[in-house]
Image (tube, rainbow, N blue to C red):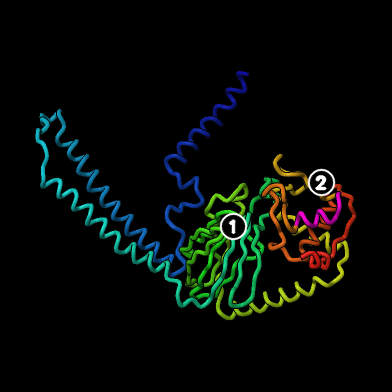
Amino acid sequence: MSTSLTASGPAVRVSLISVVALLLFPALASAEWGLNFQPPASEIAHDVYSLHMLIMMICVGIGVVVFGAMFWSILMHRKSRGYKPAKFHESTTVEIIWTAIPFLILVGMAIPSTATLLKMEDTKDAEVTIKITGYQWKWQYEYLDQDVSFFSNLSTPREQIANKADKGDNYLLEVDNPLVIPVGKKVRFLVTANDVIHAWWVPQLGVKKDAIPGFINEIWARADAPGTFRGQCAELCGKDHGFMPVVVQAVAGDDYNKWLSAKKAEMVASAADVDKSWGKAELMARGEKVYQVCAACHGADGKAPAPIFPNMAGSAVANGPLDAHIDMVMNGSKKNTMMAAYKGQMNDLDIAAVITFERNSFGNKAGDVVQPSQIKARR
């Protein structure tokens, strides 16, 4: 025991020195020392940043004057120096001064604030209009003037979330289908929700708007230069609130047009895939990818992470009548709101693939192969 304590002495001293060094020089312990807003990347974001800095400087100035006067008074008029407290009651002049000065300061702050807020709400003359719909827990993007629509889901591997793999640079801030916008063009966003209240937030673009079921809110942005900008749902929308990222890619005009053409061709090909006869192996491979959306509740290994959600392994639905399983996935649970309806969130191929995967994985032996045409017929 004595030997052990003696041997650990140098290690203890090194640890104490390390702790003291980190306390004295905190930059040594931090790879990121960001104390301000993220670098603005749009016209609105620049205005918001400038307003923030202006108000911050005003607040700092007020703090210096008020606390400076207070500390000077305490130091220079303390009892030990022989000062005695003055005795007076009320002063109309003082009342007017300390009412007028804050009033003028607030008016001075309100003028640039109002100008910025009015500019943020001015969505007219937009060159691109995109409807954004929040779902638990994903975003749907619809380019209203281009007939392009797709869902954007978290793409961080479940192994990273479960601490079974090293976390990537963009952990929980990466998606399978980012929103793409053209650089230099005013983009109008129509924001709503399908189930609960969400909030679409991209700090570098200066946009944040509540997504409320039954309502459509508006906001806009104009990206300054190409880049990738990341955000999140800023409303506590459920247990997977932290797994609902936003990724926006701003690209040059030509690249944007090429992307639109490719996306339209992809949608045409997807529609053609509905009438194709798919093999079990193909459906299983695609279904495994689609199931990542379901894994949040039912578990990546078919075992639910929380007791309130049913296991997929040995599931009565996945091993029961096929019609009931299809109905559950398409229309959701009729007994409670836990199981969402995916009829409007997935295409026919993805629904057929994920049902095929669920009925043939995790020890389930139903053996069914569901074709997209069957799902199309059920709509």
Q: Which one is nearer the viewer's eye here, 245 or 216?
A: 216
Residue type at mark 2 is Ser
**Circle 2 residue:** 315
In front: label 2 or label 1? 2
**Circle 1 residue:** 245
Q: Which one is nearer the viewer's eye here, 102 or 159?
A: 102
User: How many neighbours does mark 2 have within 10 angstroms: few (below 14), some (14-19), or many (20 or more)?
Assistant: some
**Quadrant (top left, top right, bottom left, bottom right) of the N terminus:** top right
> Residue 191's x, y, as percent?
54, 64
Q: Which one is nearer the viewer's eye here, 166 or 51?
A: 51
Please tell me the numbered disc located at residue 180: none
Looking at this rendering, what residue extends furthest in the front direction?
334
Q: Main secondary structure of the magenta part?
A: helix
> Residue 270's x, y, as percent?
75, 72
> Residue 359's x, y, as percent?
84, 53
Residue at the (9%, 35%) spot, across then down: 88
- How far apart are the alpha carbons under marks 2 and 1? 30 Å
Mark 2 or mark 1: name the one nearer the start of the chain. 1
Q: Which one is nearer the viewer's eye here, 175 or 99?
A: 99
Label 2, secondary structure: give it. Answer: loop
Report the magenta residues as a range. 320-329
> Left or right of 312: which side holds 130?
left
